Amino acid sequence: MKELSQRLQTLPASMTLAVNDKAKAMQAAGADVIALAGGDPDFDTPEHIVAAAVAALAAGHTHYPAPMIGILPALEAVAAKMERENDIPVPDPRRQIILTPGGKWGLYLALSAVLNPGDEVLILEPHWVSYPSMVTLAGGIPVAVSLPAEDNFQVTAERLQARVTPRTKAIMVNNPCNPTGRVLTSEEVEAIAAVALAADLYVIADEIYEKLVFDGRRHLSIAALPHMAERTLTVMGLTKSYAMTGWRLGWLVAAPDIIRLATRMNSQTVSCAATFTMHACVAALNGPQENIATMRDAYQRRRDFMVQALNDIKGIKCRSIEGAFYLFPRFTHSQRNSLELADALLDKARIAAVPGIAFGRSGEGHVRFAISTAQHDLERAVARLAKVAHEL
Ligand SMILES: Cc1ncc(COP(=O)(O)O)c(C=O)c1O
C-alpha cells in the first residue's frame, strides 16, 4: 500500500483525548475515575432550545438550509446579539456571518480564509490545545508568544511585538482563556489591537467562553475596538454558554471578503451546519437568558469552592479565575513534569486531568481541571487530592 498522509501523520495527537482514553479504559475496567479532563458542561441544554429544534424537525426542516451559510432568522439573531452584547456592528448579516458546525470549524475557516503558505500566526501561550495544529493544517506556521505564569499570563504589546516578523499574518486570541481562566483587561485588549494595527495583522478572536465571566465582569470583544471590526474574525457559538456541546453550532463574523472565502471553503467541505441546530440557535439567542446566568453562577460557586479547597492542600497552588471553566493549578512540591503528574493523578487518585504541557511550554508545571463537572465530583476530587498530594 502507498504511504498515508505525511501531513496528518506528523500532526500531534490531542493529549486531552489521550488522557480521556486512558481514563475511559480504567472506568471500563471498573475503576471509579473522576473526569476533570474534558470541557463538557454537566448541565442539560435548556428545554426551550430543545423544543425549538424538535419543532423544526417536526415541521419538516430536515433539508439543506437556505442560504447554506445559515437560515435568515439565525443570521439576524446572531447579528442582533453581536450588536446588543458585543458592540460589534454587523450591518450586513448575509455577507458578514457564517454559521458553522461548532466553534472549532469557525476557527479553521477563519485561518483558511486569511493564511497563505508560510504565513506566521502568533499564538498566546498557554494556548488551547488545537491552535498550533489548526494553523499548520491551514498552511501557516504557529509562533508561540510565551506568557509567564509568574506574571499572571499577562498580555503586553512588548511580548507580542517581540515575535512579529514580516511574515506575521495574524494573532489568535482566546478570551476568556482555556486553560488559564484569564479574562483580558481593557489594557490587554487594547495592546493586542495596537500591535495588530501597527503591523497590519488580522486578529482571530476565539470568544467561545464570552458568557462565562465571573464577579460581574463584562466581556470585551476585540472587534468592538476602533478600526478593529474589519481586521477581526470573531468566533463564538452555543457550545459552552448554552450547554450545547453535542449540537455543533457556532459562527464566524468577519468582513464580507473573508466570509465569501469561508463560504467557498464550506461549499467544498462540510457544506453547512445542520438546519435544525440553526432553528435552535434562534431560540437560544432570542429566548430567555436566565438559564445562562444560572449556569454561570454555578460555575462561579464551583470556582470559589475549588480554589479555596485546592489552596488548603499543602503542595498545591491555584490562582482564582475570572472566566471559562478551567482551573490551572501547580503542584509546587512535585519533581514530576506535567505529563508524569497527570499520569500520577490518574494512578494514585483516579482523577483525569490534562497535563499543562498540552497547552505549550509555558503550561509546564501545571495541570488543568475542568470545573464544568458536578459539584459532588469536585468535592470527591479534592478529598482524594488531600490524601495523595504528598506522594505527587
Ligand atoms: C478555546 C476553545 N475554542 C473553541 C472550542 C470549540 O468549541 P466547539 O465545541 O463549539 O467546536 C473549544 C472547545 O473546547 C475551546 O475550548
Image (cartoon, rainbow, N blue to C red):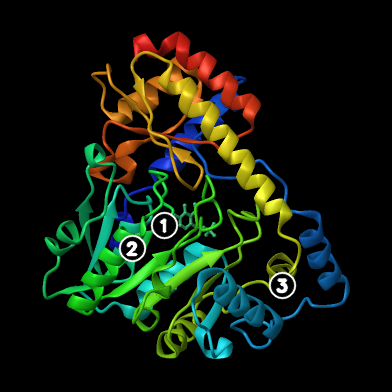
Amino acid type assigned to the residue bearing label 1 in the image: Asn
| Separation (CA) of disc 3 from disc 2 | 29 Å
Nearest the camera: 238 or 111? 238
N-terminal-most mark, 3 or 2: 2
In the picture shown, does residue 228 fall above or below 107? below
Q: Which residue is mark 3?
A: 282
- Residue that label 1 marks: 175
Residue assigned mark 2: 189
> Which of label 3 and label 2 is nearer to you?
2
Apparent side of residue 318 relative to residue 307 in the rendered image (left or right)? left
**Other-residue count near label 3 (Cα within 10 Å), few / some / many at <14 / 14–19 / ≥20:** many
Label 1 close to label 2 by CB (< 8 Å) = yes
Eye-nearest disc, 1 or 2:
2
Amino acid beneath label 3: Val
SS of the residue at dot 1?
Answer: loop
- Image-quadrant location for residue 192: bottom left
